[in-house]
Amino acid sequence: MTLQKWIKDRAIHGFSTFSIEDVRKTGMYSSEQILQNELYRLCSNKTIASVYRGFYVIIPVQYVLRGSVPATYYIDQLMAYLNKPYYVCMLNAAELLGAAHQRPQQFSVMTTFPKRLVVSTRNVTIDWFYRDELPEDALITKNTETGTIRISNPLLTAADLVRYQQHAGGLSRVATVLEELSEQIDIKSQFGPLSAFIKKVTWQRLGYILEHIIEEKEMADALYDQIHTIPGTLMYMPLSTSAEDNPSNRDSRWKININIQIETDDI
């Protein structure tokens, strides 16, 4: 049996990915160099794509012309191969929740330390983010072409967007996404599982945006009440992490130094 025939049979039986270890176990190749050459050839003719060192996705017909496969097609299988917990986060999670009006250029995935070396597919770059532990009770499951993936719930998505604001294109873009995402945020039910995972400063920034930028006063009030169930006092912090602090322009409720102007886009 050739590797190409083995891959075709694998796809027919519903397996969309494989590792180099899977191929080695078949005993098809006595030489590692011949195996590597064949994998390279199949990548070149767009039969498969290398999405991580030693891990491949079988390119389905609908993606052959692109020569790459969207990360939603294989991310769950890849993370199982790496034996790492994960969730799709930020703009990609917002898109899957129906709240991102511009398709993200990169695919954001949250996982746990330690960091690992990665290899990206052509035209698809995975942005890796890390926590010590994932907030499992704040994750939801979405169906994909090949099964399911794990994504952040609406409030965790909002918090991650604010925390990693520069990776999301700045706070104006974050606020634009939050205008749509806010329809799915329920502070009372979604805050509890996150209280131990999200820093107060993130909630402060999010609360300020909810109240003053997208004018979700009731939601902001609910978040304000929840923040004050966490021990400790609020300290004044800058709104933007990329601009110089401006303590002369302050919001006293959220303890935010307003060091940038946020303008949302028309959707």
Image (tube, rainbow, N blue to C red):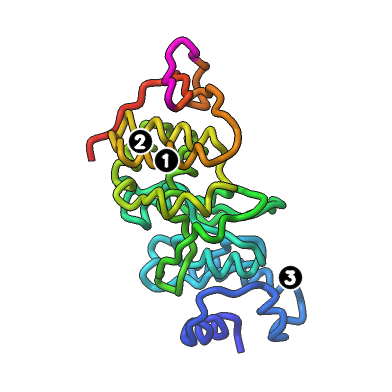
Query: Is 248 on the left or on the right of 4, as rendered?
Result: left
What's drawn in magenta, residue-wise? Answer: 246-253
Query: Helix, strand, or loop for circle 1?
Result: helix
Quick check: is 251 in the magenta stretch? yes
Q: Which mark is residue 71?
A: none
For marks 2 and 1, give the CA distance.
Answer: 9 Å
Q: Which residue is mark 1?
A: 223
> Mark 2–mark 1 contact, CB under 8 Å?
yes
In this rendering, the answer to whether 145 lies above or below 266 is below
In this rendering, the answer to whether 4 lies above or below 114 is below
Q: Using the image as rendered, state which of residue 51 and residue 216 is in the foreground.
A: 216
Is residue 68 visible in the rendered image? The answer is no
Going 66% across and 79% down the picture, which residue do you hit?
23
For marks 3 and 2, give the CA distance.
Answer: 57 Å
Going 58% across and 66% down the picture, which residue do you hit?
78
Sequence order check: which comes first, mark 1 or mark 3? 3
Going 72% across and 85% down the picture, which residue do you hit?
27
Q: Residue 172, position in %: x, y? A: 36, 31
In front of the other: label 1 or label 3?
1
Q: Quadrant of residue 72?
A: bottom left
Sequence order check: which comes first, mark 3 or mark 2? 3
Which quarter shows the N terminus?
Answer: bottom right
Query: Is 19 on the left or on the right of 48, as rendered?
Result: right
Q: Residue 75, position in %: x, y? A: 52, 64
How packed is label 2: few (under 14 Cα within 10 Å), some, or many (20 or more)? many
Q: Residue 110, position in %: x, y? A: 56, 52
Q: Using the image as rendered, state which of residue 224 and residue 163 is in the foreground.
A: 224
Q: Which residue is mark 2?
A: 210
Q: Which residue is mark 3?
A: 33
